[in-house]
């Protein structure tokens, strides 16, 4: 399977993406967590591409995409994705993991004509209570201060280690590699999420929504019921077995199978989708 690297010109600058499959197939756009890149989906793309036009995008400020002097917001990140979708040729099934899912919500709320369905993978429900709790109690997830002796690299590793499987250090190496590309702004995506008013925007999403979460993802799994309750068109929940926060790259086959099954359900016109509108 040949994957193609490309850039889209957007209102915020050039956005990098990697695509596989044929343009006429159902389009699936994949949005990564912070501070990752399209690399989070590198093993998912070949699994989706035979039957889909699968596109993994580097969000604004991450990977090979443009960086801005201004602080990131979910709204700006979503605007960049909207411009990418417009240039790709229209509607897509949008899949977002953690931060990418929050960006996906804003895309679907702002431009419902561009989102056929929305898969929210490991997405926390960010309302006023959660924003206040994070502001008061949670230390930075990835943000560390640089040190002359390089010890900050070990601190980055340690902060994420509890969320990653001990027998798969390669997954954590991939995250740290992506984080170093945006150093020292690794925390900006998380800050943007906690500034987002999801309780106002998620009710505006008219696309069918599937919630997905790893069974060991203690960060987001407790929020699934509230996430689905707030979504106007919830289509259910799939728990991914044996994985936690890095569910996408830990078990790409399980993740791709879950996404493909949901996309097929929507493309086939599930009875629960028959009343869907893009307004």
Image: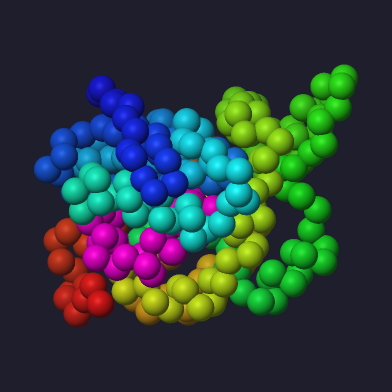
277 and 83: which is toward the camera: 83
Quadrant in which residue 106 is drawn: bottom left
Segment tinted magenta in the rendering: 91-117
Where is 187 relative to 197, above or below?
Answer: above
User: Which residue shows up at 48% across the image and 55% down it?
Assistant: 76
Q: Is residue 114 left or right of residue 225?
A: left
The residue lying toward the viewer, choosing from 71 and 34, is 71
In this rendering, would 71 be left or right of 49? right
Instruction: State the residue at coordinates (34%, 54%).
Output: 82
**Left or right relative to 230: residue 19:** left
Tell me, yes or no, if residue 45 can be seen here: no
Can residue 175 be seen here? yes
Question: Where residue 61 sits in the image (x, y, percent)?
Answer: 54, 41
Q: Position of residue 166 (x, y in %)?
A: 69, 33
Residue 57 versus residue 129 in the image, above or below: above
Residue drawn at x 28%, y 50% is 85
Residue 54 or 197: which is nearer the viewer? 197
Question: x, y (%) of residue 197?
Answer: 57, 72
- Quick check: is 111 in the magenta stretch? yes
151 or 238, which is in the foreground? 151
The magenta stretch spans residue 44: no
Image quarter where the C terminus lies is bottom left
Image: 47 above or below 102: above
| Residue furthest to the left | 24
> Going by the picture, which residue comes out furthest to the top?
149
Q: Quadrant of the N terminus?
A: top left
């Amino acid at each position: 399977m040949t994957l193609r690297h490309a850039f889209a010109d957007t209102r915020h600058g050039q956005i990098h993406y990697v695509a596989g499959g044929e343009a006429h197939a159902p389009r699936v756009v994949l949005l990564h967590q912070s501070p990752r890149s399209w690399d989070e989906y590198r093993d998912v793309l070949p699994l989706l591409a035979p039957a889909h036009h699968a596109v993994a995008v580097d969000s604004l400020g991450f990977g090979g995409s443009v960086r801005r002097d201004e602080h990131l917001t979910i709204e700006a990140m979503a605007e960049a994705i909207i411009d990418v979708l417009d240039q790709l040729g229209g509607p897509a099934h949008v899949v977002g993991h953690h931060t990418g899912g929050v960006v996906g919500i804003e895309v679907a709320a702002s431009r419902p004509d561009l989102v056929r369905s929305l898969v929210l993978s490991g997405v926390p429900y960010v309302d006023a209570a959660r924003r206040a709790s994070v502001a008061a109690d949670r230390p930075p997830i990835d943000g560390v201060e640089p040190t002359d002796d390089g010890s900050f690299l070990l601190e980055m590793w340690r902060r994420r280690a509890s969320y990653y499987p001990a027998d798969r250090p390669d997954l954590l190496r991939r995250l740290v590699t992506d984080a170093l590309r945006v150093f020292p702004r690794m925390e900006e995506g998380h800050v943007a999420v906690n500034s987002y008013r999801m309780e106002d925007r998620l009710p505006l999403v008219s696309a069918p929504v599937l919630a997905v979460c790893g069974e060991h993802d203690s960060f987001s799994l407790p929020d699934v019921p509230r996430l689905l309750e707030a979504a106007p068109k919830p289509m259910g929940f799939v728990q991914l077995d044996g994985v936690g926060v890095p569910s996408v790259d830990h078990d790409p086959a399980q993740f791709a199978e879950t996404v493909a099954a949901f996309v097929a359900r929507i493309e086939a016109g599930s009875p629960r989708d028959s009343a869907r509108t893009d307004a």
